[in-house]
Amino acid sequence: MAPTDIADPRLASSHVRILPPDDDERLLLHNEVHARPSARIRLPALVVLLAVYNHEVSREQECAHLRQLPGQEGLTVNDLQAHFLSLRLPGYTLKWERHTEFTRYTLVQPLPQAAALGVVEPDLLSHLVVPKEWLAAVPGRTFCAIAMGMVHGDLSDPTACLQGARQWLGPHLLVASLMGSFAPATVVTDFRLRDNGFEHMLVIAPPDIDDMRAGRISQRLLELETYRLMALRGLPVAKMLGPELAQAEQQLAQITAALEQKSASDQAMLDTLMSLAARVEKAMAEHVFRFSATRAYDDLVAQRIAELHETPIPGHQTIGEFMRRRLSPAMATVAATAQRLASLSERVSRASALLRTRVDIATEGQNQQLLEKLTRGQELQLRLQTTVEGLSIAAISYYVVSLLLYGAKALKSAGVPIHPEMAAGALIPLVLWAVWRTIRRIHEKLHSSH
């Protein structure tokens, strides 16, 4: 049979959808792994990071600012919905990333010859391709700004590399290490802010490094410094809360002592304790997010340090060592303050429970006394009721006997031979019994109905 030009049915069927309808968030969650890819950086390059707090900065404001760049007049807010945007502009690329608390702008351009390795403290910002006015007008408040030079170098002579790096960065104490287990690169920095507001970093890579690996190195280093500064946002909060927590703990100790010694009224202690509990819960509500975020950013810092795969250079601290010595005490302070606040909240709750128990016991004693008074009152009422019932029987019997007497007198007047007084006197016991029996039956019916 002659072959036909019909395509292989197996290939055609591979494009036929045989799945149930997609969940509303399937595409978003699936593409999250590709949300922030590493840039491809060709060395030598100048990488500039600007990270700003985006509190009260809308996506519309950031879009309007990005539209000021050449050729971006048609940019819309919908283009920024993925929290990530990479723009190719004349002579450089710009990456925009929006996070929960901050927005990052990363500029990658060729490194000018005037800023090559060996130049003494080059003025990097004078060679920026992006307009300086545009950079200064980025909406938000700056908390991290880094200018990173990435150059080729001969890593077989670490001394010569570090000498060139010292000239490039300046005379300050350097942090340096080899990164990567295969064909390592050298990173050198001093973690110092210059007068222009930027930190400087230098990456010296082997000549055969590929663009993707250079991009990953840049991304890890920039994220490491960004997350370090975000993690430290919890430190001022912890220091501010210290005196307030000490005062609250002292007040709680006084309340507990008064509770033990019964030296104050329950109502006064309850009012003081409720006021203290409100203050503690307010502090928890205001700062629990900051402390949780600090832990999360600290974990990211540790993760990025691990991804560097650092090898020490004799005589110099690695970035990991520097972070452990400088960042760990701050993180320990934040963690201790968060634990202290949570512990204070639990102790206030326990003191409140003890005071409530004491108040409940006192209330139960008062209720018991009230019940005893009510019981005594009911007993007196019952005795009075019994007395009244006895008097009632006598009164009713008196009226019944009186009626019988009048009846007997009427019969005598009608000619019946009867002595009214004797007949009435003879009927008195019967009348008393009948009245008593009737009242008893009424009581029995009332009790049976309840």
Image (cartoon, grey):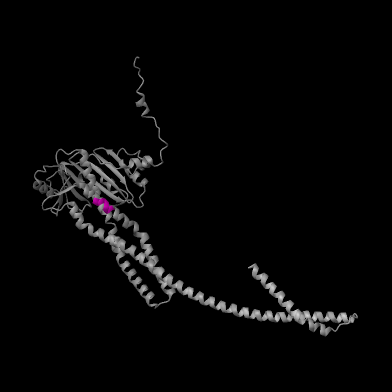
Query: Split into 4 quadrants, where in the image is the N terminus?
Result: top left
Position of 433 with respect to 124 (left or right) is: right
Q: Is residue 149 visible?
A: yes
Instruction: Locate residue 344: give its quadrant.
Output: bottom left
Instruction: Locate residue 374: give its quadrant.
Output: bottom right
- Nearer-the-camera pick, 174 or 367: 367
Query: Split into 4 quadrants, where in the image is the C terminus?
Result: bottom right
Q: Residue at x 22, y 39 (%)?
A: 212
- Nearer-the-camera pick, 221 or 261: 261
Q: Residue at x 70, y 75 (%)?
A: 439
Relative to 404, is 82 above or below? above
Q: Is residue 225 visible?
A: no
Give the image location of residue 48, x and y in percent: 23, 46
Q: Residue at x 81, y 80 (%)?
A: 404
Relative to 391, is 323 above or below? above
Position of 163 with respect to 240 (left or right) is: left
Relative to 258, is 46 above or below? above
Give the image location of residue 271, x and y in percent: 42, 71
Q: Give, as a single range, the part of the protein colored magenta.
A: 297-302
Give the image location of residue 323, x and y in percent: 20, 54
Dominant secondary structure of the residues highlighted in magenta in the image? helix
Whether residue 131 appears in magenta in the rendering, the answer is no
